[in-house]
Amino acid sequence: MKIYISADIEGVTGVTHWDETDLNKADSQIAREQMTAEVVAACEGALQAGASEIWVKDAHWTGRNIIASKLPKEVKTIRGWSGSPMIMVQELDITFQGVVFIGYHARAGMATNPLSHTMTGQVASVTINDRQASEFLIHAYAAAYLKVPVVFVSGDKGLCADVSQFNPYIQTVAVKQGIGNSTINIHPELATALIREGVAKALTGDMNRFQVTMPANFITKIQYKEHTKAYLYGNYPGANQVDACTVQYENKSYAEIMRFMLFAMSF
């Protein structure tokens, strides 16, 4: 069994302030260590369930956060950013049997994480077919396009609620809850234990239960915080600016939606 793990940091237990997500700040070291520990736990759960090969995408900011020497030897890591339209699931293909998201977080505008955002802090909201989209939803559809199911997600309580509404079969572990500009976090060791157990459980049994039906057509809207961004990205081929701050793009192929998002949210 070949498993893909995409890891972010704003949904890791304990991570509360932007300084903890910035490699240039001293506060980031503890966050990096816990991000690594949660990824290690996911790898151990996958191995327990029978995985023989695991690929891990470091999907936060520079893509160089995970301490690779602490990962199991069966793991290949993807560091940095290639420019692939698959963005946070770069190198995912049909040879994988399942996808795991670790440290993911609430979408822009949600009050369940003080670090909530969608791809970039310059975006106010993203919708896909009128559904408010998080980074989870964007990349869950990318996986579904390849017919590879997302089986497990860890992150904040609000994101986990969104995941369950999207597909109640996906295993989730909420490691934190945002209250205003603060967070309530479970203990780091409890987080890793629950992630290890949850991933192992998710990868045991019929994987078809995680598959989602792809819409026949996709209408994506990106609302920017600054009208100048909407003017700029409204010039993307096939896109149109629907109001001062919003750009819309429609396509039947989700691969083309991802290509649009790569350019429209890369600053």
Image (spheres, grey):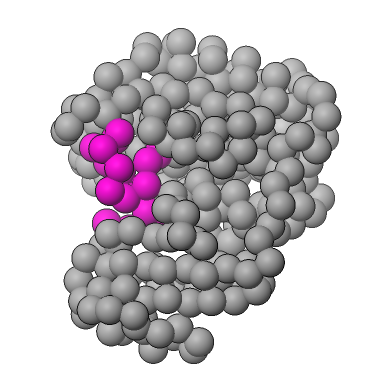
Q: Main secondary structure of the magenta part?
A: loop
- How many numbered discs? 0
Quarter of the rendering containing residue 45: top right
x then y, percent, for residue 96: 77, 46
Quarter of the rendering containing residue 251: bottom right
Left-right relation of 58 to 62: right
Left-right relation of 148 to 7: right
Q: Is residue 26 visible?
A: no
Where 80 falls versus 255 (above or below)? above
Left-right relation of 238 to 211: left
x then y, percent, for residue 196: 60, 18
Q: Nearer the viewer, residue 54 or 238?
A: 238
Residue at horizontal 50%, vertical 87%? Answer: 238
Q: Which residues are magenta?
A: 105-121
Residue at horizontal 28%, vertical 79%? Answer: 243
Q: Is residue 212 visible?
A: yes
* Residue at the limit of the structure toward the front, as seen here: 130
The N terminus appears in which quarter of the rendering?
top right
Where 10 falls versus 213 (above or below)? above
Residue at horizontal 30%, vertical 62%? Answer: 123
Give yes or no for residue 59 being in the magenta stretch: no
Q: Nearer the viewer, residue 149 or 42?
A: 149
Residue at horizontal 43%, vertical 36%? Answer: 159
Where 223 falls versus 69 (above or below)? below
